[in-house]
Image (cartoon, rainbow, N blue to C red):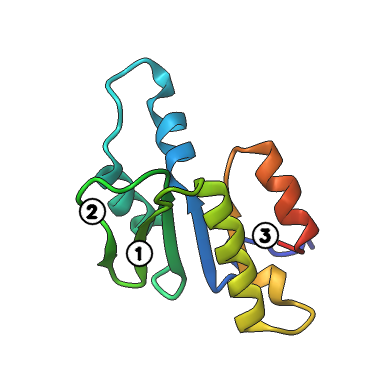
Amino acid sequence: MRPALRTPFEDTDRLIVDGTNLLHRMGASGGAPVPAAALIGRLRGVVPASIMIELIFDGMGHGIFGRVAQQMFVKYSGRRSADDTILDLASEAIMQIGGPIAGAKVLVVTDDRGLRTLLSTKGV
């Protein structure tokens, strides 16, 4: 008997996505750049509605921000880097959840190796 397959969202309460990073990855196929709004429907369509999603972009913003769908928020880093904003959000989420399993309830999606290293030191 094989063990049940675990989904990436199992036990996850909060998903923090490096939106700028994801846009670059999606547009890497040589086609036209993917607009930020395209990520909203795609993410909400594959992530269970019970999980809060925070989509973080670099910069000051381009029209779409705040609550954009059920349990989904778009945020811009402003004058800070998106990496710093993501680190702060992950730390805040862990403090809100508390306890030894707090880091397991927060999932951060990024392709940034340096950010992943910093997040792992926080237990995410």
Where does the C terminus fall, quadrant-wise?
A: bottom right
- Of the residues shown, which amino acid type is indicated by label 2? Ile
Circles 3 and 1, Cβ within 8 Å, touching? The answer is: no
Image coordinates of residue 20 in percent, x first then y, are: 43, 40
Query: What residue is at 27 percent from the left and 43 percent from the top?
Result: 38
**In front of the other: label 3 or label 1?**
1
Crowd band around label 3 with a 10 angstrom C-alpha radius: few (<14), some (14–19), many (20+): few
Q: Secondary structure at mark 2?
A: loop
Residue marked by disc 1: 73
Residue marked by disc 3: 5
Residue 11 makes an appearance in the image = no
Q: Is residue 51 left or right of residue 36?
A: right
Residues under labels 1 and 2: Cα distance?
A: 10 Å
Residues under labels 3 and 1: Cα distance?
A: 29 Å
Q: Is residue 71 left or right of residue 14?
A: left
- Which sits in the foreground, 107 or 95? 95
Residue marked by disc 2: 64
- Which sits in the foreground, 80 or 113? 80
Q: In the current view of this chain or complex, which residue is farthest to the top?
A: 30
Where does the N terminus fall, quadrant-wise?
A: bottom right
Image coordinates of residue 37 in percent, x first then y, are: 25, 46
Q: Earlier in the sequence, mark 3 or mark 2?
A: 3
Image coordinates of residue 32 in percent, x first then y, are: 27, 21
Image coordinates of residue 75 in percent, x first then y, are: 37, 58
- Of the residues shown, which amino acid type is indicated by label 1? Phe
Residues under labels 3 and 2: Cα distance?
A: 36 Å
Q: Is residue 103 left or right of residue 84?
A: right
Displayed quadrant of residue 45: bottom left
Q: Secondary structure at mark 1?
A: strand
Query: What residue is at 79 percent from the left and 80 percent from the top?
Result: 100
Relative to residue 38, is residue 1 depicted above or below? below
